[in-house]
Image (cartoon, rainbow, N blue to C red):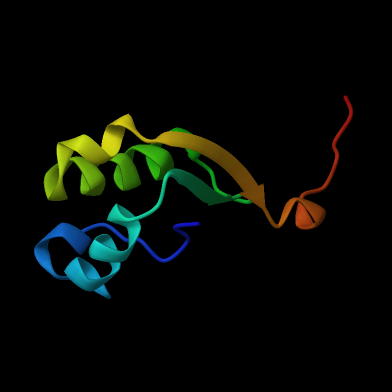
Amino acid sequence: DIPGLIEGASDGKGLGIKFLKHIEKVKVLIHCIDAQSTDYEKDYKVVRNELKKYNPEMLKKKEIILLTKSDLVENKVS
């Protein structure tokens, strides 16, 4: 589960390298993306880019993409 990984983590921003070292040990990555986001793809790519910059081998791990806060998204039917 990598909800705390932010842009710049591979450069030491936020929990940075400490958090990435922890992630390196897991077998499956769960990407938690806010369902209220206006750009899911960008959010996902930011995390993937940080993983790649830290250690390209991490991109080979199995992944699950999870949308969080889906209960806050209104269902609009046209």
Residue 54 spot, x, y in % from top left? 14, 50
Q: Is residue 35 visible?
A: no
Q: Nearer the viewer, residue 33 or 38?
A: 33
Relative to 37, 43 lies left or right = left
Residue sitting at the far right: 77
Q: Quadrant of the C terminus?
A: top right
Q: Nearer the viewer, residue 34 or 19?
A: 19
Residue sitting at the far top: 78
As drawn, 70 above or below 58: below
Which residue is pictured at 21% across the width and 62% down the height?
9
As drawn, 65 above or below 4: above
Quadrant in the rendering for residue 72: bottom right
Q: Nearer the viewer, residue 72 or 67?
A: 67
Relative to 24, 63 lies left or right = right
Residue 56 spot, x, y in % from top left? 16, 37
All told, the count of numbered labels is 0
Relative to 76, 63 lies left or right = left
Q: Is residue 77 visible?
A: yes
Which residue is pictured at 85% across the width and 36% down the height?
76
Which residue is pictured at 30% across the width and 40% down the height?
48
As drawn, 59 above or below 73: above
Relative to 32, 56 lies left or right = left
